[in-house]
Image: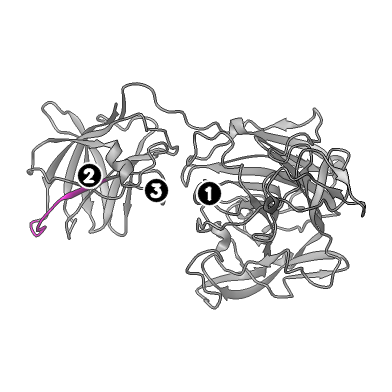
Amino acid sequence: MSRILFRSSALAMAIAATACGGGGSNNDDDGQVNIPNDPPANERPEQCLEDPLNSGYCLVWADEFSGEAIDSEKWAHEKNCTGGGNNEAQCYTDAAENSWVADDMLHIKAIREDATGPNLVDDDPNYDPGDASGSGTYTSARLRTKGMGDWKYGRFEMRAKLPQGQGSWPAFWMLPSEWKYGGWPLSGEIDILEAVNLKVGGEDHVHGTLHYGDVWPGNKYTGVAYQIPGGLNPADDFHTYAAEWEEGEIRWYVDGDHYATQTKDGWYSAAALGNPNAPFDQSFHLILNLAVGGDWPANVNDTGIDESAFPQEYVIDYVRVYQCTEDFDTGKGCATSDSDFVLEPGIAPPQAPEGEEVSVFDGEAKDPYQWFTWTAFGTVDFEVVDAGGDYGDVGQISWNTDQGIGFFQSTNSYDLSDYTYMEFDLRVLAEPDDSGSASLTFRADCGHPCSSGDYPLDMPAVDQWTHFQIPMLELAEMGLNTASVNTPFVISPAWDNQMGAVLQVDNVKLTK
């Protein structure tokens, strides 16, 4: 489900993947299919649930919703009012009014009603189910298979009828079960099916999307929109939605029609730039939810949320998971495809810079770097001024706050591991009279939570240019992933009262 900000803590959860083994098959006495013990036994089920399809895909998990209640051994409810990281309007609950099984169908219902609940996602270590600090103006449900159904590669399929109306946002999607590469979207997200505002102004598209790249603002997403042939609207009837995921490739389908493909040439994780398959090479779990409003649906079609359109129901006939018997390790050899699909190019990973040095600022910020500030209050002002003499134009930073930093940042991360030093010239023009033992701190970042930490700088004499040369190796030893740096320069005063501090910087560069 499309996300703008990270929604969940990057908790490591050691969960064994359930998968169908590879390397051929043979029938046992009860007619089921045994898969040879090539992979470790704790990484696959002992048997396929039925004979492999003609393609070689083997059914390993399914919920036909034929019972009288939601199967708690397959699905868990998430319960929170976080807004999904997208300013969504709903609280997710486990109330029977918001999700239930009836007539061999799973129903997820979004209802217009005020609600409160936890303002943290369920995986956050500080999560308290009794917390009521979050609120929403709708209730709905979000179910996931995490810890009960986690897979690396396969075919993930759902038959469903989607809700309609301005503000409706149903999704069938996947998140990583262990967040190996870090917080969202460093560890990836696979959106098998999304749709917003169906039937509003004729809206009839569904979407298949990947999220990857770096932490905000370097997060990336690419995907393809699809219209069902014949003018059919997904809110009028049931259709089958699926994604096939194998090593280095993900494909999307509606009613068996292969409409889009993305490959590893157009995705990456900034935390693993040397791994071309990352982040889509780890176990993921399934999520079903119906969101209301949020940054996407509220800003397209008629915009906002049409309260009169609710309640709305998202009705799911079944969810099935298959894995490829041809090659367990890669998931390859069972692809269903035709030539009539969109090859989404995606976004290639950022390349390592070339040359003996990389200029970040020399009187102007150098592409791809820009100047940014962060403050808890007040301002950290930045301007280019003429310092005269040998320096000419320099960057001047003025603190009108007791808390704040200034930094040069790129929206992409770059591999700076071949560079030896971060160098810059700095002059202190003014420091507060009551500063006491004044000092300066420097650091470099590769996206939260990766940082070198505060690197102390010797305080130079006021109004005297001083050259600093920071070893990248020392920053790495302090925690910086030098192979994925988006913010090579962060500066701040380190005295009790920053108010009134003025610094100048120039010749900011990385050198080998």
Nearest the eye: 330 or 302: 330
Lateral position of residue 169 relative to residue 318, left or right? left
Colour setup of the view: one colour
Q: Secondary structure at mark 2?
A: strand
Compared to 275, does 453 lie above or below?
Answer: below
Q: Are there few (<14), some (14-19), or many (20+) residues within 10 Å of tag 1?
A: many
Lateral position of residue 344 relative to residue 347, left or right? right
Q: Amino acid at mark 3?
A: Cys
Distance from disc 3 to disc 1, alpha carbons, whole Å, reads 14 Å
**Residue beneath label 2, please?**
397
Q: Amino acid at mark 1?
A: Lys
**Label drawn at residue 180:** 1
The rendered magenta stretch, by its main secondary structure, is classed as loop
**Label drawn at residue 450:** 3
Quadrant position of residue 487: top left
Query: Counting residues from the N terminus, which is met first, the one under dot 2 or under dot 3?
Result: 2
